Image: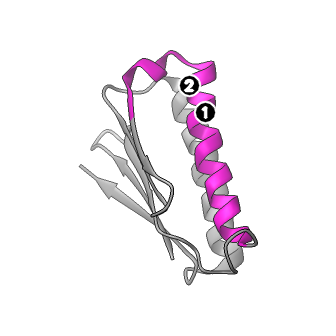
Amino acid sequence: MITVTITKNASNEYCAVQLYGHAGYARSGRDIVCAAVSVLVINTFNSIEAFTEDKKFMEIAENEKEGFIHCRFLRTVSRETALLLDAMVLGLQGVQEQYSKKYMKLIFEEV
């Protein structure tokens, strides 16, 4: 199962996004749940880097074999980045609804 954890502070501002695991919906290379989640998350991070100034304040760690990506924001994100992250969350919620929590779990944490 893929676990995606969205971390926000008490002011409802994004602090971090972490993805861990593999969906197990189908074998590697044919797993549409894993592909959908990966595209949503990676495209969001790439979009933040390409279209906002927040790229200077992102720390990203990844391990493809383990299905691990962690992005931490070192300061409050811009409105543009928050909108991109909101769109990512909307897409992830759609994947979770479509394929059940058996393959992907979306967690919200407050720090």
Residue 48 included in the magenta stretch of the image: yes
Q: Amino acid at mark 1?
A: Asn
Tell me the residue at 55%/41% (across/down).
85
Task: Indicate the colouring scheme.
Answer: one colour
**Which of the numbered marks, if any, corresponds to residue 23?**
none
Q: Amino acid at mark 2?
A: Glu
Disc 1 target residue: 46
Real-space Cα separation, disc 1 to disc 2, in angstroms? 5 Å
The image quarter containing residue 52 is top right
For the residue carrying disc 2, how many other residues have a C-alpha within 10 Å: few (<14), some (14-19), or many (20+)? some
Disc 2 target residue: 49
Tell me the residue at 71%/75% (across/down).
98
Element type at mark 1: helix
Q: Is residue 94 left or right of residue 67?
A: right
Q: Are marks 1 and 2 in contact (CB under 8 Å)?
A: yes
Element type at mark 2: helix
Does 96 sit above or below residue 50? below
Where residue 25 appears, x then y in whole percent?
A: 66, 80
Tell me the residue at 67%/67% (across/down).
95
Q: Which residues are magenta?
A: 31-59
Does 74 sit above or below residue 35? above
Does 111 sit above or below residue 67? above
